[in-house]
Amino acid sequence: MLAGLRRTYEGRPLLESDLSSDPIAQFTTWFQDALDAGLPEPNAMILATASAGGRPSARTVLLKGYDERGFVFYTNYESRKGRDLAENPRASLLFPWHPVRRQVRVEGIVTRISHEESAHYFASRPYGSRIGAWASRQSAVVRSREDLDARYEELAARWPEDPPVPDFWGGYRVDPIEVEFWQGQLDRMHDRLRYRRTRPGWVLERLAP
């Protein structure tokens, strides 16, 4: 059954002349295309990390900001991804925009953003999400759902209006060293165009599919 699961990709070829000289500007164009196409959660991205020993881990997180400095997401510093990044501050991101036959892959160096930036974003989150950030010691073993819910209720009673930003929670920025734009094509002859950072600036290269 699995051998027969396949789709045919058709579309206009992606040429070097179609792309901006800057990968962030190009990402902006494609992200807007994903929004215009009505994709569900186009800012959802797969974040891959690895421990110091090389054990990989991947999960879906949400892109919450980007600019020329890189791509920003937020999490618990004590989570598995947080521990991985403390040991090995490198990561890969993947935006799987399947309905439009596109993917964007980013590889880069990861740093924490400032506490001020994290606090500003935290204050913009819905109240329940802010309490949830306090209630969940992300990736830690919990005895039961009941214990987790009780912790949430305890913290909601403690901060009925404005919970502060936890000291174990905040943002990370992935500063890209490679950004690849993938466009599906017929016969698996997909277009893969990669920006690679060098000392003089970004170099655009075509990769074999």
Image (spheres, rainbow, N blue to C red):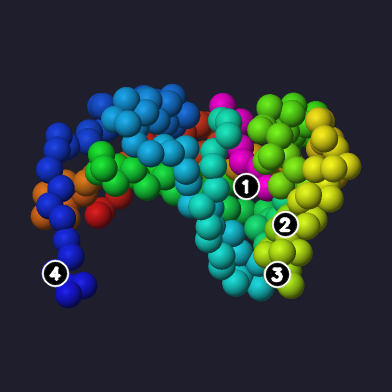
> Does 31 sit left or right of 148 as displayed?
left
Dividing the picture into quarters, in which one does residue 50 lie? bottom right
Does any portion of residue 22 appear in the rendered image?
Answer: no
Report which residue position mark 2 lands on: 149
The numbered mark, 4 or 1, whose residue comes first in the sequence reads 4
Query: Residue 56: x and y, percent?
Result: 56, 67
Q: Which residues are magenta?
A: 67-75
Residue 99 x/y as whole percent: 26, 42
Q: In which quadrant is the C terminus drawn?
A: bottom left
- Look at the numbered disc 2 and give the secondary structure of its residue: helix
From the viewer's perspective, is the residue at label 4 or at label 2 nearer? 2
- Secondary structure category for the residue under label 1: strand
The disc label shown at residue 191, or none: none
Judged left or right of residue 99, residue 138 is: right
Residue at 34% across, 43% down? 97
Would you say the residues marked 4 and 2 are in contact, meaning their CB atoms lie under 8 Å apart?
no
Q: Which mark is residue 109?
A: 1
Q: Is residue 173 visible?
A: yes
- What amino acid type is highlighted by mark number 4? Gly
Compared with 15, 196 (above or below) is below
* Residue occupying image coordinates x 88% and y 42%: 158
Label 2 vs 1, first from the N-terminus: 1
Give the residue drawn at x 21%, y 72%.
2
**Disc 2 and disc 1: Cα gap in Å?**
36 Å
Give the class, few, some or many, for how many residues have Cα within 10 Å of label 2's Cα (few <14, many ≥20): some
